Image (tube, coloured by chain):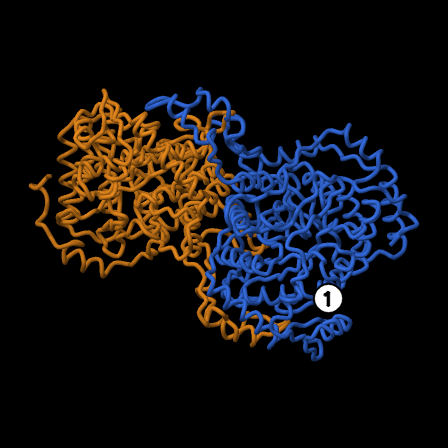
Chain colours: A blue, B orange
């Protein structure tokens, strides 16, 4: 905690000056997180679920998991009743599931703008952008290493994206900032350029602590409120490394949310079968989430599943595949039975360009995510080339397609207005509905409309240069960045955040690896 | 019937010479039609379904439907108990549903190669290519009017496509052949260049009869077997024109299958609401399918729903939208309750190019079709620009994506081999699965693999020219056409078909409108 540079603690949501500034600022439209009014799709029957659950318990008890370079974690597990041999932790059947029971089924992640706080769990779906690519791509500049300037642009695009509820975390790796300091700039960007919820750093326990401290400044005191959801990857198979666990320990202690997420390329980090992969995923999530409850019972934690298949010819990970869909559906069922919020799916694709391959693969995964009951979708827009690249054009293309999910999730109204029997009477056989009273009253909200895709007649489209989706999207990127208006932030908080970043940067030499 | 030019009737599946020729020919791989082992996705609850069903009956009884220029149809309806005023047919509640009860829940459409016969109904999904575009597009030639040469190429591509079960019908309009004769060339192409099942002509009752007669020649006698599934569009709202009904009358009388399909751009031909559109769709399908049973009880008939939304800014139809998905899911539920096979979804998109827009929109619709329980998917590949264009590249791109649906539909195995517990034991924490016994035994069939999409590392892809999906697909089009081998056909049957086409062409002057 960096009390010395924190401003005077304030009520939730920032001070009076911030509130006044906010009221006078241009309001950027942002949809509420998705509340599903449609059922979840389920591929596993009761028998299959029981087999996988029983096998996961067998894996935990018989094979166990490794907590590497983390003697304190081993002590915690021993105290909780696990059998610890070296770094191997064997968890008696039922223990991990019992420990998970103290985690909330659903939790609120607060944003500094209270209108943008999100509820993660239940029927809800909260969507965040791409996370982690070292490269960026756009039509003008091609593929290149990401910089802090790129990062800031992505945060602005996320803020301007109506269907995106969350600002995310490492939307790209700002490779021009030292490894040990870039988390400070990234957090400051999310905090100052957006007012949507965000993620914290996980690359070092001390950086997780920086994330907590900066959040404390931004929110004027955390008081155990959850204001970050951060990504804790499991080193599959069955290994929990000290870096990620160290970050989890910091976050759980501060009541900040973690996604405990197996990172699996099927056939490499898990068996080539769906049932085998689900077994391992469940075992890993059970162990990781149980461990978070050993740190602090009640700490919010999310059942994660990042799973792709592999092309056995080239060894490349593949995306939008049927096997990934099966796992995404099945893991959703397992998460709901465990009573935890669920993270999976995203704008996944293996394509090098935002072309048709990217479109097919991404749409496959986005649709699967909605239908699978995902509660937190990381990588919801902008992912390209197996996650190596954050694409500016694909960011806005995907973010636009997220609108399809919002409307799909609303389900079908059958009230009297929706039944439209009077319209059918009015029009009758052979007529048309364009001018009828029901159409006039309802057409504005009747159909979802893309802000990116081309709906023009061929001749108009051709006269305008015959642009493909990527080129149209490039124009939208430019427009959104031009229209961007920074959300107001209390100047005292802003100065305190800047002072914290400055102080932390001065405290250590630059490191680039 | 053209008995004079038909060869001697033979047993099913062609003669001995054909069978011998077939055995020596190169075998082209073709997947069996999809048999779903996953549940259907349902958006309507019981109450919503009952409201829509009751409203559809109200529409039929109170508003009725129009059978235009078709006095014999009016007589049939009068005899069946409907109230006929002018061309308006008002159908008492329950009558249409009762008449539909004689239609089969599922039926076999035979192909001349018995291995390629398809079962339409139940958990099955049979996929046919795009239907109707006056234009074609490819990378080399751009967008242009379709010709018979294009048509033949599409039939060959369909024959070579592993995941396509059906050769379709008017895969594009061969505009260089007279309107009143092109159906003969199209049928001959399906019959001679492919051995997959096909569709008949619906543009004139006499052309439907030609389709029956040519099929009689091809199969050596039909004997009431179903060998065609043809597309009967309803002139929505609530209008049945004499051309389409004339074709339906020919087909139903010959026990050939018809898709009775409302053709709806929502907001123009139906109300702007999903529930209102579903009401009208159900009323129209009930009337059309009931009419087919008045022609011949037991004639196979399919509940069709071709439904898109409209862009209220430009008036253009839009595809892959959430409203179309809601209708596709809902209509599937209504079809199953009515006990009829269901046709909907396809490779729909509004894009002018096979780009990312095409990918998103198409994947949205293909996924919806699988999950909605569609039994016959027309337009399963090749559709571009709202159906105005058949795209060569998109044909092979979409046909490849149909492989995703095949694997998805198989569901998840949980037998002991799939559970892979021994593999998890063998590898343990921190290991990898690439070389383990379970992977070696299962990797070949573990993951679906695209034959089109790019899985190469960035550097390789870049060295090879940085091709987008369209360019990669163009190479595949060329390769498939090069590799194409015509399936064997009994020379006597082939000559008889050619003689029939020649005779029918000579019997009338050319017409181009």
Residue furthest to the right in view is A4
Foreground residue among B124 and B316:
B124
Residue at figure coordinates x 67%, y 63% from the top left: A289
Tag count in the figure? 1
Side of B339 where A61 appears, left or right: right
Question: Looking at the picture, how far across and down is residue A233, in whole percent?
Answer: 67, 60
Residue furthest to the left in view is B4
Side of B297 where A248 appears, left or right: right
State whether residue A353 is above or below residue B433.
Answer: above
Write down the chain letter for disc 1: A
Crowding at dot 1, Cα within 10 Å, few <14 / some 14-19 / many 20+, comes out as many
Question: Looking at the picture, how far across and down is residue B12, in whole percent?
Answer: 16, 54
State whether residue A318 is above or below residue A428.
Answer: below
Considering the image in quadrants, where does the C terminus of chain A appear? bottom right
Question: Taking the image as drawn, is residue B467 in sight?
Answer: no
Among the 4 quarters of the image, the one containing residue B82:
top left
State whether residue A296 is above or below residue B3.
Answer: below
Foreground residue among A499 and B237:
B237
Side of A424 where A11 appears, left or right: right
Question: Taking the image as drawn, is residue A20 in sight?
Answer: yes
Element under disc 1: helix
Residue furthest to the bottom in view is A85
Question: Looking at the picture, how far across and down is residue A422, in whole percent?
Answer: 41, 24
Question: Looking at the picture, how far across and down is residue A502, in whole percent?
Answer: 88, 48
Residue identified by numbered label 1? A294
Foreground residue among B62 and B369:
B62
Residue at figure coordinates x 89%, y 47% from the top left: A6
Foreground residue among B511 and B475:
B511
Considering the image in quadrants, where does the N terminus of chain A appear? bottom right
């Amino acid at each position: 905690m960096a009390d010395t540079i924190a401003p005077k603690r304030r009520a939730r949501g920032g001070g009076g000056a911030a509130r006044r500034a906010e009221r006078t600022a241009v309001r950027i439209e942002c949809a509420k997180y998705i509340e599903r009014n449609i059922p979840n799709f389920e591929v596993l029957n009761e028998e299959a679920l029981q087999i996988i659950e029983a096998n996961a318990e067998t894996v935990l008890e018989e094979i166990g998991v490794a907590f590497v370079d983390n003697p304190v974690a081993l002590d915690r597990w021993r105290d909780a009743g696990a059998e610890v041999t070296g770094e191997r932790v064997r968890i008696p059947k039922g223990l991990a599931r019992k420990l998970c029971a103290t985690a909330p089924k659903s939790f609120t992640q607060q944003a500094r703008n209270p209108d943008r706080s999100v509820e993660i769990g239940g029927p809800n779906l909260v969507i965040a952008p791409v996370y982690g690519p070292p490269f960026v791509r756009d039509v003008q500049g091609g593929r290149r290493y990401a910089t802090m300037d790129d990062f800031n642009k992505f945060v602005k695009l996320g803020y301007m994206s109506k269907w995106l509820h969350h600002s995310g975390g490492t939307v790209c790796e700002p490779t021009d900032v030292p490894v040990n300091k870039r988390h400070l700039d990234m957090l400051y960007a999310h905090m100052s350029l957006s007012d949507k919820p965000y993620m914290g750093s996980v690359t070092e326990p001390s950086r997780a602590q920086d994330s907590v401290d900066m959040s404390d400044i931004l929110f004027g005191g955390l008081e155990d409120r959850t204001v970050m959801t951060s990504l804790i990857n499991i080193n599959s198979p069955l290994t929990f490394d000290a870096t990620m666990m160290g970050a989890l320990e910091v976050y759980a202690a501060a009541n900040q949310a973690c996604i405990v997420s197996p990172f699996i390329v099927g056939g490499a980090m898990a068996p080539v079968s769906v049932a085998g992969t689900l077994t391992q995923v469940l075992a890993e999530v059970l162990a990781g989430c149980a461990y978070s409850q050993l740190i602090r019972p009640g700490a919010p934690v999310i059942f994660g599943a990042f799973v792709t298949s592999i092309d056995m010819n080239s060894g490349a990970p593949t995306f939008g595949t049927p096997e990934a869909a099966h796992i995404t559906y099945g893991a959703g069922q397992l998460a709901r039975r465990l009573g935890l919020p669920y993270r999976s799916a995203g704008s996944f694709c293996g394509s090098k360009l935002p072309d048709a391959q990217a479109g097919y693969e991404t749409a496959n995964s986005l649709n699967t995510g909605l239908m699978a009951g995902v509660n937190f979708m990381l990588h919801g827009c902008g992912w390209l080339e197996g996650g190596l690249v954050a694409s500016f054009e694909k960011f806005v293309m995907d973010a636009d397609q997220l609108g399809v999910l919002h409307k799909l999730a609303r389900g079908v109204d059958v009230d009297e207005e929706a039944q439209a029997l009077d319209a059918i009477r009015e029009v009758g056989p052979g007529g048309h509905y364009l001018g009828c009273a029901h159409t006039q009253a309802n057409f504005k909200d009747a159909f979802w409309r893309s802000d990116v895709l081309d709906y023009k007649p061929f001749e108009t489209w051709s006269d305008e240069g015959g642009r493909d989706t990527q080129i149209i999207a490039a124009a939208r990127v430019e427009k959104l960045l031009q229209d961007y208006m920074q959300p107001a932030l209390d100047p005292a908080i802003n100065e305190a955040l800047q002072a914290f970043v400055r102080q932390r940067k001065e405290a250590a030499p630059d490191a680039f690896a």
